[in-house]
Image (cartoon, grey):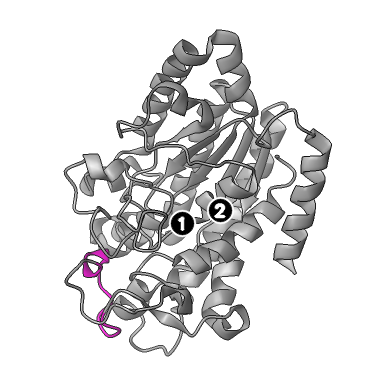
Amino acid sequence: MVLNLVMCVCGLLFLYIGNAQDTIVPAIITFGDSIVDVGNNNYLSTLFRADKPPYGRDFVNHQPTGRFCNGKLATDFVAGTLGFKSYAPAYLSPEASGKTLLIGANFASAGSGYYDKTATQNHAIPLSQQLKYYKEYQSKLAEVAGQSKAKSIMKDALYVLTTGTTDFIQNYYTNSYLRKTYTVEQYSSMLISLMKNFTENLYDLGARKIGVTSLPPLGCIPLERTLAGTHESGCVSQLNTDAQGFNKMLNNAATSLKKKCPDLRLVIFDIYKPVYDLVNSPSMYGFAEAGRGCCGTGTVELTTALCNSHSLGTCSNATQYVFFDSAHTSEAANKVIADEMINQGLSII
């Protein structure tokens, strides 16, 4: 039903814009972590890289792209629905130059988060640095398109911010100092303040259409089900409660930001519910396995490092799996998530 709605809406949008442009928005600018990283970490000295098989095995060229997935990310599907025939490049890649910059850029880095120290300890690109790269991008775009056209592109572009998961599963939950210093609510509040500051800075730089994704159900991620949920048969309820608390704060922050920033079109993409539904009712969506990743042992889902060319038990058909590795959803699941994002984001596009 959601897919039919998306197709119908996109058809109406196409009729509305006619032949004036090939895409519904001129560019897509992406910030965040491994959920949306398309290869920036390939150019960093970090353990968080997806530059070896079986990552990318179901992508267009069947080669690793830097995406933590067997194929397309949810944002790739969103780009396709909006009319893009190619994807905005990873900013650190050689492809991020010349006319390619006209369709946007991706600044995301696996291991990053709202909290800069999360990225620093993972040797990833902090969100503050991603914003600095965006300022560089603005200058490069002006050189390619001219000041006036560049300003128009930046104003009408779709901005996507997807982060926060790493702040919890690879920092707060594993960092005894943070847990002693902050309650979950206090830590979440700190992250929300960083999110609001980042969004306001982006707004001051010309962004007007911004989509921020919520946290997924943290307790349903195979990694966390193994590390923290050995006493539970399904998702780890406490971690899901933490995610829900953060998401409530995130929605309140969005309301506050829209009141403060004139003409800001900001939407929170709820990915908690679609991922939760996929995990708890996989067969309804055509999946057979939601408790472990396609690439892993099925018993010790510890790190994304399990997903490499020597991994034991890597599945032959990832379309049957909600997760591809121990922390990231498969291409098939990403399609379901993307359909929900499009449906929720109509107000900003």
Give the Cα separation between the discs numbered 2 and 1.
Answer: 7 Å
In the image, is residue 318 above or below residue 126? below
What residue type is disc 2 on? Phe
Residue at 26% across, 82% down: 313
In percent of width and height, residue 70 lies at: 38, 63
In the image, is residue 298 above or below residue 186? below
Residue at 25% across, 44% down: 42
Task: Tell me the crowding category of disc 1: few under 14, some 14 to 19, or many 20 or more residues within 10 angstroms, Cα based.
Answer: many
- Name the side, left or right, on which 348 lies relative to 111: right
In the image, is residue 19 above or below residue 341? above
Location of mark 2 (residue):
77
Quarter of the C terminus within the rendering: top right
In percent of width and height, residue 250 lies at: 58, 50
Quarter of the N terminus within the rendering: bottom right
Q: Is residue 124 visible?
A: no
Location of mark 1 (residue):
72
What residue type is disc 1 on? Lys
Task: Tell me the crowding category of disc 2: few under 14, some 14 to 19, or many 20 or more residues within 10 angstroms, Cα based.
Answer: many
- Residue 265 lies in the magenta stretch: no
